[in-house]
């Protein structure tokens, strides 16, 4: 199954992963799908992986169900809301019994197998079992969109470095840098996303 | 004419602008199309602008012809090659007599009017006069792609700050940061683009 048409290509594809616990609770989180290419009988073969950390709901859901949905989207607001656990049920649809984000451009269901486990992370190999493309589009690169993604990653790391004052300062400086790019280059969705991020970041900092 | 479907939306859209001089010489350069929204009779109206700096070929061509083509693409290699003036004729097609990049996802021809001129820049207001969508797609966000764009912007600024040792060091530190993101997250095109950027950057630094 070639996932390039569905938006998953070599390198790390930043998507929103939706999962369901055994008891049916839904979760969404921004996560990178790692795709590596190996040569297989003169033909490139893509392998997909995901790295998850202790304490994440995606990890515990995957342990229970061995399935995840990758939602491909370029909506900055969805990324920020997913990062701070603010996507309620109205954002979800279902595809083959698994939760998906209604507004995503494509959905890919992966079956997972634990490939590596160490003290720091769990690595799962992923096999695509179903794909749905909802919407194709043309979109110019917007530096504001990526600034939101980078700032979201920083914000979710803030909890981890909270004991280290120097790292905290460095991180705050970078947040200001990215906020500046969003202000200059972003559209409405990027500015709305940065606003939500700011609110959540202030809560983290208290 | 609504350009959203062709990929140009509110904020700054990073595109490759192709132009032709009066004598027919082709040029390509990565440039941001600025789109602002104003309310017009209860309906949002988009206004498009481009800011150009003294010495750029795009500026002199626009002065001569009052027309530019915005090529919407997410190909990192095209951005880097355009920034360092390395796109030869084989990359070009023609649309309504104006040069365009064959591989771009969409083409928009703009008519330009000088709106503001100061010692630092020239601001042109742009009116779209023709649009062609070549290819729609789904693509997950790749942090490597944007790292290439950010690094390209830094590299093109390097010439300007070359006298300031502190700024040069700061800029190099950021370049290393972005190169790290490309190495970790980029696909084949992003890595190829970063390689070209590195070569050109080393030349700048000599």
Image (cartoon, coloured by chain):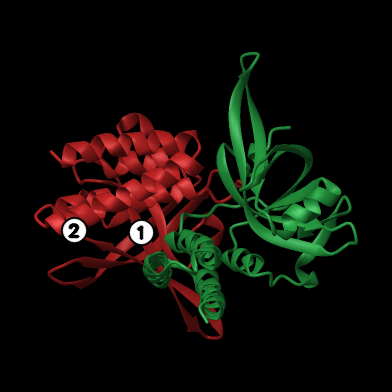
Chain colours: A green, B red
Q: How many other residues sit within 10 Å of disc 2, few (<14), some (14-19) or many (≥20)?
A: few
Circle number at residue B32: 1
Which of disc 2 and disc 1 is earlier in sequence? 1
Circle number at residue B189: none
In the depicted view, which residue is nearer to us: B165 or A188? B165
Q: What residue is pinned by disc 2?
A: B167
Which secondary structure, mark 1? strand
- The x and y percentages for residue A47 are 66, 32
Inter-mark Cα distance, 1 to 2: 24 Å
In the depicted view, which residue is nearer to us: B128 or B153? B153
**Can marks 1 and 2 be said to lie on one chain?**
yes
Q: Residue furthest left?
A: B163
Image quadrant in which the N terminus of chain A is located: top right
Would residue B180 be found to the left or right of residue A42 on screen? Answer: left
Task: Determine the residue positioned at 35% across, 65% down.
Answer: B126
- The x and y percentages for residue A190 are 51, 69
Would residue B140 be found to the left or right of residue B180 on screen? Answer: right
Chain of the residue that carries numbered disc 2 in the rendered image: B
Q: Is residue B100 visible?
A: no
């Amino acid at each position: 199954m070639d996932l390039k048409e569905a938006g998953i290509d070599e390198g790390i594809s930043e998507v929103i992963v939706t999962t369901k616990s055994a008891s049916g609770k839904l979760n969404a989180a921004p996560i990178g799908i790692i795709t590596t290419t190996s040569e297989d009988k003169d033909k490139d073969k893509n392998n997909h992986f995901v790295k998850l950390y202790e304490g994440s709901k995606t990890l515990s859901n995957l342990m229970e169900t061995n399935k995840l949905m990758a939602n491909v989207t370029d909506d900055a607001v969805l990324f920020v809301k997913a990062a701070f656990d603010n996507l309620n049920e109205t954002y979800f649809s279902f595809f083959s019994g698994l939760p998906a984000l209604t507004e995503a451009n494509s959905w890919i269901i992966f079956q997972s197998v634990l490939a590596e486990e160490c003290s720091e992370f769990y690595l799962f190999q992923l096999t695509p079992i179903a794909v749905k493309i909802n919407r194709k589009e043309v979109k110019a690169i917007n530096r504001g969109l990526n600034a939101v993604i980078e700032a979201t990653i920083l914000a979710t790391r803030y909890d981890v470095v909270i004991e280290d004052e120097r790292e905290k300062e460095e991180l705050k400086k970078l947040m200001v840098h990215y906020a500046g790019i969003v202000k200059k280059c972003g559209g409405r969705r990027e500015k709305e996303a940065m606003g939500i991020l700011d609110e959540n970041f202030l809560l983290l900092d208290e």
